[in-house]
Image: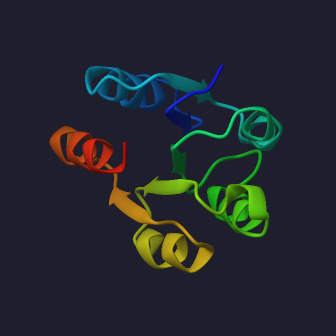
């Protein structure tokens, strides 16, 4: 089943909050809290928007974004990277993320971005 928004964050609470925001704008969602399992799941179902944490224990968001941007099939995938890191925006942009939001993020800003992308 195709999903509009795929969320990957090792913090289950943040992933669930982002999922509720996505559902509130009418999007279908998928959530993965183990970043090492994300790539195989994305290959089965490419969403319109991937929301990914930059720093996760299994595989970093930076590494995943770079890998996704290296594959033709993911070229149209829009990526929102979120992080509490001071240099997160620079790292996310250099990896290939389309958008960046700092944690803690503003729910209305996330919702506005989803409405634009979806």
**Residue at image x 32%, y 43%?**
114
Left or right of 108? Residue 99 is right
Of the pair 87 and 4, the residue shown nearer to us = 4
Q: Position of residue 13 (x, y in %)?
A: 44, 24
Residue appearing at x 32%, y 22% in the figure: 26
Would you say 32 lies left or right of 106 here?
A: right
**Residue ranking furthest to the right:** 40
Q: Residue drawn 50% across and 56% down? A: 78
Q: Relative to residue 41, is residue 53 depicted above or below?
A: below
Figure quadrant of the N terminus: top right
**On the picture, is 29 further left or further right than 112?**
right
Residue at 27% over, 44% down? 110
Residue 65 falls in image quadrant: bottom right
Task: Work out which residue is located at the far left of the displayed protein and give it.
Answer: 108
User: Up-down: is 13 above or below 77?
Assistant: above
Position in image of residue 16 (x %, y %): 43, 22
């Amino acid at each position: 089943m195709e999903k509009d928004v795929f969320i990957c964050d090792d913090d289950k609470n943040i992933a669930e909050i982002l999922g509720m925001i996505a559902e509130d704008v009418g999007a279908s969602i998928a959530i993965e809290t183990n970043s090492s399992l994300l790539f195989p799941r994305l290959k089965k179902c490419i969403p319109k928007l991937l929301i990914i944490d930059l720093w996760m224990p299994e595989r970093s968001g930076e590494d995943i974004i770079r890998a996704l941007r290296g594959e033709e099939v993911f070229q149209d995938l829009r990526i929102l990277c979120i992080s509490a890191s001071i240099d997160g925006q620079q790292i996310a942009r250099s990896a290939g993320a389309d958008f960046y939001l700092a944690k803690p993020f503003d729910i209305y800003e996330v919702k506005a971005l989803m409405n634009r992308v979806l």
